[in-house]
Protein backbone atom coordinates (compact mmCIF):
# COMPACT_ATOMS: atom_id res chain seq x y z
CA UNK A 1 0.00 0.00 0.00
CA UNK A 2 1.10 3.55 -0.69
CA UNK A 3 2.73 4.95 2.42
CA UNK A 4 2.07 8.44 3.58
CA UNK A 5 5.69 9.49 3.26
CA UNK A 6 4.39 10.12 -0.26
CA UNK A 7 7.20 8.66 -2.28
CA UNK A 8 7.10 8.60 -6.05
CA UNK A 9 9.31 6.01 -7.75
CA UNK A 10 11.18 5.61 -4.49
CA UNK A 11 11.96 9.32 -4.22
CA UNK A 12 10.63 11.52 -1.45
CA UNK A 13 8.09 14.07 -2.63
CA UNK A 14 10.47 17.05 -2.73
CA UNK A 15 13.25 15.19 -4.54
CA UNK A 16 10.75 13.83 -7.06
CA UNK A 17 9.49 17.32 -7.80
CA UNK A 18 13.05 18.63 -8.22
CA UNK A 19 14.22 15.71 -10.36
CA UNK A 20 11.32 16.23 -12.73
CA UNK A 21 11.74 20.02 -12.71
CA UNK A 22 8.19 20.53 -11.55
CA UNK A 23 7.43 24.25 -11.65
CA UNK A 24 5.97 26.08 -8.68
CA UNK A 25 2.41 25.85 -10.04
CA UNK A 26 2.84 22.23 -11.00
CA UNK A 27 4.27 21.50 -7.59
CA UNK A 28 1.17 23.08 -6.16
CA UNK A 29 -1.02 20.83 -8.30
CA UNK A 30 1.20 17.88 -7.46
CA UNK A 31 0.79 18.54 -3.76
CA UNK A 32 -2.98 18.78 -4.24
CA UNK A 33 -2.89 15.48 -6.10
CA UNK A 34 -0.84 13.87 -3.33
CA UNK A 35 -3.24 15.17 -0.71
CA UNK A 36 -6.20 13.76 -2.66
CA UNK A 37 -4.45 10.41 -2.98
CA UNK A 38 -3.67 10.47 0.75
CA UNK A 39 -7.35 11.18 1.52
CA UNK A 40 -8.47 8.29 -0.70
CA UNK A 41 -5.88 5.99 0.87
CA UNK A 42 -7.05 6.92 4.36
CA UNK A 43 -10.72 6.49 3.40
CA UNK A 44 -9.97 3.13 1.84
CA UNK A 45 -7.97 2.07 4.92
CA UNK A 46 -10.78 3.13 7.24
CA UNK A 47 -13.26 1.37 4.97
CA UNK A 48 -11.28 -1.87 5.20
CA UNK A 49 -11.06 -1.53 8.97
CA UNK A 50 -14.75 -0.78 9.05
CA UNK A 51 -15.65 -3.76 6.87
CA UNK A 52 -14.05 -5.97 9.49
CA UNK A 53 -15.94 -4.23 12.27
CA UNK A 54 -19.30 -4.32 10.57
CA UNK A 55 -19.43 -7.83 9.14
CA UNK A 56 -21.82 -8.74 11.94
CA UNK A 57 -23.59 -5.41 11.83
CA UNK A 58 -26.12 -5.85 9.08
CA UNK A 59 -29.14 -3.83 10.05
CA UNK A 60 -31.17 -4.98 7.03
CA UNK A 61 -30.68 -7.79 4.55
CA UNK A 62 -33.56 -7.38 2.09
CA UNK A 63 -33.89 -5.85 -1.35
CA UNK A 64 -31.53 -2.90 -1.89
CA UNK A 65 -32.94 0.37 -0.68
CA UNK A 66 -32.73 3.38 -3.00
CA UNK A 67 -31.66 6.43 -1.05
CA UNK A 68 -31.23 9.99 -2.32
CA UNK A 69 -28.75 12.27 -0.55
CA UNK A 70 -29.29 15.97 -1.12
CA UNK A 71 -26.23 17.87 0.02
CA UNK A 72 -24.26 21.07 -0.57
CA UNK A 73 -24.15 24.66 0.63
CA UNK A 74 -22.32 26.46 3.33
CA UNK A 75 -19.85 25.61 6.01
CA UNK A 76 -19.10 21.88 5.83
CA UNK A 77 -16.96 19.40 3.92
CA UNK A 78 -19.78 17.77 2.00
CA UNK A 79 -17.46 15.78 -0.27
CA UNK A 80 -15.92 14.03 2.72
CA UNK A 81 -19.25 13.64 4.52
CA UNK A 82 -20.83 12.09 1.43
CA UNK A 83 -18.01 9.61 0.94
CA UNK A 84 -17.98 8.67 4.63
CA UNK A 85 -21.76 8.32 4.90
CA UNK A 86 -22.31 6.34 1.71
CA UNK A 87 -19.41 3.95 2.37
CA UNK A 88 -20.39 3.33 5.99
CA UNK A 89 -24.08 2.76 5.30
CA UNK A 90 -23.38 0.43 2.36
CA UNK A 91 -21.38 -1.71 4.81
CA UNK A 92 -24.38 -1.90 7.14
CA UNK A 93 -27.21 -2.50 4.66
CA UNK A 94 -27.79 -2.93 0.93
CA UNK A 95 -28.25 0.69 -0.06
CA UNK A 96 -28.00 2.19 -3.53
CA UNK A 97 -27.13 5.85 -3.20
CA UNK A 98 -27.90 8.73 -5.52
CA UNK A 99 -26.10 11.92 -4.53
CA UNK A 100 -27.18 15.41 -5.56
CA UNK A 101 -24.57 17.94 -4.45
CA UNK A 102 -25.76 21.21 -5.98
CA UNK A 103 -26.16 24.85 -5.09
CA UNK A 104 -22.52 25.75 -4.49
CA UNK A 105 -21.03 26.54 -1.11
CA UNK A 106 -23.01 29.62 -0.16
CA UNK A 107 -26.04 30.12 2.06
CA UNK A 108 -28.60 30.66 -0.71
CA UNK A 109 -29.61 28.38 -3.57
CA UNK A 110 -32.63 26.94 -5.30
CA UNK A 111 -31.59 23.70 -6.94
CA UNK A 112 -33.04 22.29 -10.14
CA UNK A 113 -33.89 18.89 -8.60
CA UNK A 114 -37.04 20.07 -6.84
CA UNK A 115 -38.63 21.57 -9.96
CA UNK A 116 -39.74 18.11 -11.00
CA UNK A 117 -42.88 17.34 -8.96
CA UNK A 118 -41.83 13.66 -8.97
CA UNK A 119 -38.30 14.42 -7.78
CA UNK A 120 -38.36 11.84 -4.97
CA UNK A 121 -40.34 9.17 -6.83
CA UNK A 122 -37.46 6.73 -7.51
CA UNK A 123 -36.27 6.67 -3.90
CA UNK A 124 -37.29 4.89 -0.72
CA UNK A 125 -35.77 7.57 1.55
CA UNK A 126 -34.36 11.08 1.12
CA UNK A 127 -31.44 12.21 3.30
CA UNK A 128 -31.18 15.99 3.66
CA UNK A 129 -27.66 17.13 4.58
CA UNK A 130 -27.67 20.54 2.97
CA UNK A 131 -27.08 24.04 4.32
CA UNK A 132 -28.92 26.99 2.75
CA UNK A 133 -30.03 29.23 5.60
CA UNK A 134 -30.97 32.22 3.49
CA UNK A 135 -33.24 30.54 0.95
CA UNK A 136 -36.77 31.49 1.88
CA UNK A 137 -39.00 31.19 -1.19
CA UNK A 138 -42.21 29.53 0.14
CA UNK A 139 -43.12 27.93 -3.21
CA UNK A 140 -39.69 26.37 -3.48
CA UNK A 141 -39.73 25.06 0.10
CA UNK A 142 -43.17 23.51 -0.38
CA UNK A 143 -41.97 21.60 -3.46
CA UNK A 144 -39.83 19.71 -0.95
CA UNK A 145 -42.09 19.43 2.08
CA UNK A 146 -45.19 18.49 0.04
CA UNK A 147 -43.43 15.39 -1.24
CA UNK A 148 -42.56 14.35 2.32
CA UNK A 149 -46.06 15.22 3.51
CA UNK A 150 -47.37 12.76 0.91
CA UNK A 151 -45.30 9.97 2.47
CA UNK A 152 -41.64 10.08 1.40
CA UNK A 153 -39.55 9.14 4.47
CA UNK A 154 -36.61 11.36 5.35
CA UNK A 155 -33.46 11.72 7.41
CA UNK A 156 -32.33 15.22 8.34
CA UNK A 157 -28.76 15.94 9.43
CA UNK A 158 -27.12 18.94 11.12
CA UNK A 159 -27.35 22.05 8.92
CA UNK A 160 -30.60 20.82 7.36
CA UNK A 161 -31.98 22.25 10.62
CA UNK A 162 -30.71 25.73 9.71
CA UNK A 163 -31.69 25.43 6.07
CA UNK A 164 -34.57 27.80 5.12
CA UNK A 165 -34.04 29.39 8.53
CA UNK A 166 -35.05 32.80 7.23
CA UNK A 167 -38.32 31.53 5.74
CA UNK A 168 -41.52 33.06 7.09
CA UNK A 169 -43.45 29.81 6.64
CA UNK A 170 -43.10 26.90 9.11
CA UNK A 171 -43.49 24.03 6.64
CA UNK A 172 -39.81 23.01 6.68
CA UNK A 173 -39.57 23.26 10.48
CA UNK A 174 -42.76 21.19 10.88
CA UNK A 175 -41.19 18.61 8.61
CA UNK A 176 -37.90 18.54 10.58
CA UNK A 177 -39.68 18.34 13.92
CA UNK A 178 -37.56 21.11 15.44
CA UNK A 179 -37.02 24.85 15.15
CA UNK A 180 -33.43 25.97 15.55
CA UNK A 181 -31.92 29.32 14.64
CA UNK A 182 -28.45 29.13 16.12
CA UNK A 183 -25.88 26.88 17.70
CA UNK A 184 -23.32 26.96 20.48
CA UNK A 185 -19.56 26.45 20.17
CA UNK A 186 -17.84 23.28 19.05
CA UNK A 187 -17.02 20.85 21.81
CA UNK A 188 -17.17 17.16 22.66
CA UNK A 189 -20.72 16.81 23.95
CA UNK A 190 -21.78 13.86 26.17
CA UNK A 191 -25.06 12.41 24.85
CA UNK A 192 -27.78 10.98 27.07
CA UNK A 193 -30.33 8.60 25.56
CA UNK A 194 -33.89 9.47 26.61
CA UNK A 195 -35.72 6.73 24.73
CA UNK A 196 -33.71 3.53 24.97
CA UNK A 197 -36.51 1.33 23.67
CA UNK A 198 -36.76 3.10 20.31
CA UNK A 199 -35.52 0.74 17.55
CA UNK A 200 -33.11 3.38 16.17
CA UNK A 201 -31.32 3.55 19.55
CA UNK A 202 -30.73 -0.19 19.93
CA UNK A 203 -27.03 -0.74 20.61
CA UNK A 204 -26.35 2.97 21.13
CA UNK A 205 -23.73 3.30 23.92
CA UNK A 206 -24.79 4.37 27.42
CA UNK A 207 -22.04 6.94 27.44
CA UNK A 208 -21.21 8.37 24.07
CA UNK A 209 -19.44 11.66 23.68
CA UNK A 210 -19.45 13.28 20.27
CA UNK A 211 -16.27 14.12 18.40
CA UNK A 212 -15.96 17.92 18.21
CA UNK A 213 -19.34 19.15 17.07
CA UNK A 214 -21.81 21.99 17.47
CA UNK A 215 -24.73 22.04 19.89
CA UNK A 216 -27.84 23.32 18.11
CA UNK A 217 -30.24 25.26 20.28
CA UNK A 218 -33.78 24.02 19.72
CA UNK A 219 -36.37 26.63 20.55
CA UNK A 220 -39.43 24.70 19.53
CA UNK A 221 -40.55 21.19 18.61
CA UNK A 222 -43.34 19.94 16.37
CA UNK A 223 -46.37 18.02 17.67
CA UNK A 224 -45.21 14.69 16.28
CA UNK A 225 -41.62 15.02 17.47
CA UNK A 226 -40.16 12.53 20.00
CA UNK A 227 -36.68 13.18 21.41
CA UNK A 228 -34.44 10.10 21.52
CA UNK A 229 -31.34 11.72 23.05
CA UNK A 230 -30.25 15.00 24.56
CA UNK A 231 -27.05 16.91 25.27
CA UNK A 232 -26.42 19.79 27.64
CA UNK A 233 -25.08 23.26 26.93
CA UNK A 234 -21.65 23.97 28.40
CA UNK A 235 -22.77 27.56 28.90
CA UNK A 236 -26.00 27.17 30.86
CA UNK A 237 -26.49 23.39 31.33
CA UNK A 238 -29.79 23.57 29.45
CA UNK A 239 -30.48 20.32 27.60
CA UNK A 240 -31.23 20.19 23.89
CA UNK A 241 -32.69 17.36 21.82
CA UNK A 242 -29.90 16.12 19.54
CA UNK A 243 -31.46 12.93 18.14
CA UNK A 244 -35.19 12.54 17.50
CA UNK A 245 -37.93 11.16 15.30
CA UNK A 246 -40.83 13.12 13.86
CA UNK A 247 -44.22 12.03 12.63
CA UNK A 248 -44.86 14.47 9.78
CA UNK A 249 -48.45 13.86 8.69
CA UNK A 250 -47.80 10.13 9.04
CA UNK A 251 -44.37 10.22 7.34
CA UNK A 252 -41.36 9.00 9.32
CA UNK A 253 -38.55 11.52 9.74
CA UNK A 254 -35.36 10.81 11.66
CA UNK A 255 -33.10 13.69 12.69
CA UNK A 256 -29.88 14.61 14.41
CA UNK A 257 -28.32 18.03 14.88
CA UNK A 258 -24.83 16.53 14.99
CA UNK A 259 -22.69 16.30 11.85
CA UNK A 260 -20.59 19.45 11.68
CA UNK A 261 -17.14 17.91 11.50
CA UNK A 262 -15.41 15.20 9.52
CA UNK A 263 -14.60 13.72 12.94
CA UNK A 264 -18.30 13.11 13.54
CA UNK A 265 -18.65 11.56 10.07
CA UNK A 266 -15.75 9.23 10.92
CA UNK A 267 -17.30 8.08 14.20
CA UNK A 268 -18.76 4.57 14.09
CA UNK A 269 -21.48 5.38 16.65
CA UNK A 270 -22.69 8.31 14.55
CA UNK A 271 -22.54 6.28 11.34
CA UNK A 272 -24.47 3.39 12.96
CA UNK A 273 -27.04 5.89 14.16
CA UNK A 274 -27.62 7.48 10.75
CA UNK A 275 -27.71 4.07 9.04
CA UNK A 276 -30.35 2.92 11.54
CA UNK A 277 -32.27 6.17 11.07
CA UNK A 278 -32.37 5.67 7.31
CA UNK A 279 -33.62 2.10 7.63
CA UNK A 280 -36.12 2.93 10.36
CA UNK A 281 -37.62 5.82 8.38
CA UNK A 282 -38.26 3.41 5.49
CA UNK A 283 -39.69 0.77 7.84
CA UNK A 284 -36.80 -1.58 7.00
CA UNK A 285 -34.77 -1.70 10.22
CA UNK A 286 -34.49 -5.40 11.01
CA UNK A 287 -32.26 -5.63 14.05
ZN1 LIG B 1 -22.11 23.11 11.24
Image (spheres, rainbow, N blue to C red):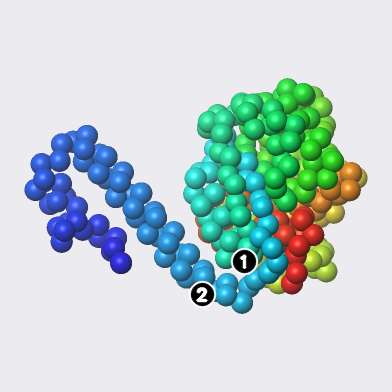
Q: Is mark 1 within 8 Å of ligand 1?
A: no
Q: Which residue is mark 2?
A: 52
Q: Position of residue 136 (x, y in %)?
A: 72, 24
Question: Which quarter of the figure has residue 54?
Answer: bottom right
Number of other residues with Cα within 10 Å of mark 2, as a class: few under 14, some 14 to 19, many 20 or more? few
Which residue is located at x 31 percent, y 43 percent? 32
Give the secondary structure at mark 2. Answer: helix
Image quarter hosting the C terminus: bottom right
Image coordinates for residue 248, horizontal then vertical, percent: 85, 45
The N terminus, quarter of image: bottom left
- Whether 88 is drawn above or below 141: the answer is below
Looking at the rendering, which quadrant does residue 170 occupy?
A: top right
Viewer-closest of 40 and 4: 40
Per the image, the residue denoted by label 1 is 92
Is 175 rendered above or below residue 265? above
10 Å crowding of disc 1: few (<14), some (14-19), many (20+): many
Marks 1 and 2, the one that precedes in the sequence:
2
- Residue 246's x, y, as percent? 83, 49
Q: Residue at x 47, y 70 (%)?
A: 49
Q: Is residue 190 above or below residue 259?
A: below
The quarter holding residue 61 reads bottom right
Residue in the image at 75% along x and 32% along y: 117
- 3D distance between C-alphas at marks 1 and 2: 11 Å
Q: Residue at x 73, y 22 (%)?
A: 137
Residue 161 higher or lower than 275, as above or below:
above
The answer to whether residue 284 of the structure is visible from this angle is: yes
Q: Position of residue 93 (x, y in %)?
A: 64, 65
Task: Tell me the SS state at disc 1.
Answer: helix
Amino acid sequence: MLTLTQRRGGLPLKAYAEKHSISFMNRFHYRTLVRSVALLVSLSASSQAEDKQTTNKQFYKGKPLKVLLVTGGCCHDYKFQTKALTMATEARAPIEWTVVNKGGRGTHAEIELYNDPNWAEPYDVVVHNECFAKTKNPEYIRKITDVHKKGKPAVVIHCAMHTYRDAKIDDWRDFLGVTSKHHEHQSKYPVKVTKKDHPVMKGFPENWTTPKDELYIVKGTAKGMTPLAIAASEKNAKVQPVIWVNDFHGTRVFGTTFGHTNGTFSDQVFLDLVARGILWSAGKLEN
